[in-house]
Amino acid sequence: MKFLGARIVLGVSGSIAAYKAVGLLRSLIQEGAHVSVVMTEAASRFVSPLTFEVLSRNPVSINTFAAREEMTHLSLPEQAQAIVVAPATANQLAKYATGLADDLLSTMALTATCPFIVAPAMDGGMWDHPAVQANVATLRRRGVIVLEPEDGPLASGKVGKGRLTEEAVILAALEAALAPRRDLVGQRMVISAGPTQEAIDPVRFISNRSSGKMGYALARAARERGAEVVLVTGPTALSIPAGVEVQYVSTAEDMAKAMQSRLSWSTVVIMAAAVADFRVARPSAKKIKKCGTAWQHLDLEPTDDVLTLLSQQRSPSQTIVGFAAETEAVAEHAAQKLKYKGLDLVVGNNVVEAGSGFGSDTSAAILIDREGRTTAIPVMAKRELADKILDHVKLLHGHHKQSPPEHI
C-alpha cells in the first residue's frame, strides 16, 4: 500500500468535478491512508457530505464555527502529513494566494506546514485568465504543488483547459510529496550557477542579470534525490543548499578551471551559470576616473566557451546539460546550441517572458535532447522545474550506460 498509515486531509471545493473526489477518496483509503475530508459549503451542494463520511469513516468538516470547539482548522493541518484539494476552484486559488480565510478550507491553508497539493478545475477560459495565472504563480513560488488541469469538454459545453487532472496524476504527486525520491543515489553532479564578473578596474566589472536561482534549485533537488553535488557558483546572494559542496568563482576563467577540475569526477554536468561571453582585454590596475578619456571605449575579447570545452573533454558515459537563455526563437536557438556544442540536453527559456525572467522564482522552459525529443514545460517554481530537468537527465544518463552515443 502506497499510503499505509498516512494521515491525509482531502479538501473539496464547489466544482461540478467534486464527484471525482469520491473516487479519489476511495483510492486513498484502498492504499491505506487515513483521510479527513473538509468541504466548502458550495461543494456540499454537489456531493452530500454523508458520502464522504461513509467512505472515510470520519466526520466531514465544513463550517468553521461548528468546528471551533475542537479547533479543527488547527488540529487537522497539524496532524496531516499532506493536504490535497481536489477539485480546487479559481475562487479557492485566489483565497490561498491572497491569504483570505473566510471558510474552514481556506483557513486551514494558512495554518498548514505539510505538503499542500492543489488540483484546479474550472470552466473554459478561466485557467488562462491573467488573475488566475498570477495566483498560480504566487502559490508555486511558496512551494504549493499546483497541478495542471486538462484540456477537454467542460460542464458548460465549452472545450478548453479546466478539467480536473486524472486521479493517477494526483496520487503520483501525493506519493512524491510524502516519499521524496532517492533515485539519483550514486550520481555525481557538477552544477554551475549564477553570473560571472569580468573586471574593468578594481571597482567596476561587466556582468549579467543572472540570479543563480535555477542552478541552486537544481543543486538542492539533486542532493535531495540522493546525488553527490558540487555547486560551482558565481557571485550570488543565495544560501548554499544543505549537503552540497560549494566552490566559489568570479570570472569566466575561474568558472572554466573549476568545472574542468571536477569533470573527471562527475557523471553529470549541468551548466546553468550565465558565463560572460566577453571580458575587458586590459583591465585597469587602478580605478578609472570618470573625468578621464579611458571611458571613451572598452576593448573586449571573447572568453573561453566553458560548455564547449567540457563537452569536448567529457567521456562518452558522461551526460552534459546546457542552458540557452533567449529573447526570441527559443526552440530554434536552443536546438542549434545542442548541436554545435555537442550536448545531451539543452534547457531553453525566454528571459523576457512574464514569470520567466532573470531573478524570477518561476520559469518556463523547452527541453530538447540528443534524441530529438522536445518537451515544453509551463511556468512553474524553479524548484519544481529542477525536478523536471533531472527526470530528463536521469532518462538520458540511463541510455548512456546502455549504449554510449557517438560524440557529436
Image: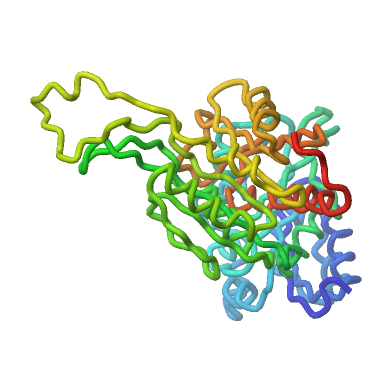
Residue 205 is left or right of residue 332, and the answer is left
Q: Residue 322's quadrant in the figure?
A: top right
Q: Which quarter of the image is occupied by the C terminus? A: top right
Q: Residue 311's quadrant in the figure?
A: top right
Res 197 seen here: yes
State the colouring used for the structure image.
rainbow
- Image point (56%, 30%), residue name: 350
Q: x, y (%) of residue 81?
A: 68, 73
Q: x, y (%) of residue 13?
A: 71, 53
Q: Which of the pair 103/174 is nearer the observer? A: 174
Q: How many marks?
A: 0
Res 132 seen here: no
Q: Which of the pair 305/184 is nearer the observer? A: 305
Residue 42 is left or right of residue 258, and the answer is right
Q: Residue 222's quadrant in the figure?
A: bottom right
- Image point (38%, 48%), residue name: 250
Residue 277 is left or right of residue 109, and the answer is left
Vertical side of 374 occupied by 257: above or below: below
Q: Which quarter of the image is occupied by the N terminus? A: bottom right
Q: Which of the pair 295/150 is nearer the observer? A: 295
Vertical side of 224 occupied by 283: above or below: above
- Image point (72%, 69%), residue name: 178
As drawn, which residue projects farthest toward the top? 296
- Image point (72%, 51%), residue name: 318
Vertical side of 242 occupied by 277: above or below: above
As drawn, which residue projects farthest toward the left? 291
Q: x, y (%) of residue 359?
A: 45, 42
Vertical side of 331 occupied by 270: above or below: below
Q: x, y (%) of residue 362?
A: 55, 44
